[in-house]
Amino acid sequence: MLSRWHLAACLVLMLAAAALGWQVQGWRCERMQAESDQLQAQQRVEQVEALNAQLHAERVQRQGLESRLNASESQHFQELTDAQLTQARLRDRLATADLRLSALVERDSACAPVPAATGASGVDHGAIRARLDPTHARRIIAITDDGDRGLIALRACQAYVRALAP
């Protein structure tokens, strides 16, 4: 039979083998944990890079939209300024009697008949025009000015919506 020393030696060897197995298992778990941590870190880096690329693309898109909107705004501001200058010139010309507004008057059959052949007298038998009172002409110009501004504002709004729509 086995002696006590042999039995103790076997027991010590078994304990040493168990301790060694325990240590090897710990190393293996640590290695697996390290690999898992490294994989998670790599995935996080990839996610951050993807988010960074997405943010960059959105920033570029936003800057492009802002530049298009700024160009559109400056264009519409220029149109509005041009329309205001045109209206101001027209009002000035009306005020200085350099320009008179007139309206076509329809010829009635009761009016003097138009000769069939024109003579050498130089009389023009064209459309009859009636001059408008300067006050009424200014009111008409003011109305067209408001209309021009409204149309320019409408075009600006439409351009803004078109720029925002994909």
Image: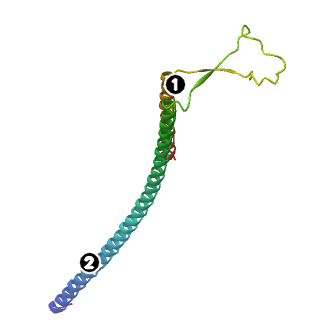
Q: Which mark is residue 26?
A: 2
Q: Which is more foreground, mark 1 or mark 2?
A: 1
Q: Earlier in the sequence, mark 1 or mark 2?
A: 2
As measured in the structure, the alpha-carbon distance from the residue carrying label 1 to the one carrying label 2 is 99 Å
Q: Position of residue 140 (x, y in %)?
A: 51, 25
- Crowding at dot 1, Cα within 10 Å, few <14 / some 14-19 / many 20+, comes out as some
| Front in this rendered view, residue 13 or 68 | 68
Instruction: Give me the residue at 16% from left, 88% from top.
Output: 8
Amino acid tagged 1: Ala
Q: Which mark is residue 137?
A: 1
Instruction: Give me the residue at 72% from left, 10% from top.
Output: 111
> In which quarter of the view is residue 37 placed?
bottom left
Whether pointer 1 and pointer 2 mark residues with C-beta atoms closer than 8 Å, the reply is: no
Query: In this picture, is 117 found above or below 12?
Result: above
Judged from the image, the secondary structure of the residue bearing numbered disc 2 is helix
Query: In this picture, is 7 found above or below 160?
Result: below
> In which quarter of the view is residue 26 placed?
bottom left
Judged from the image, the secondary structure of the residue bearing numbered disc 1 is helix
Left or right of 30, for residue 55: right
Q: Position of residue 128 (x, y in %)?
A: 68, 19
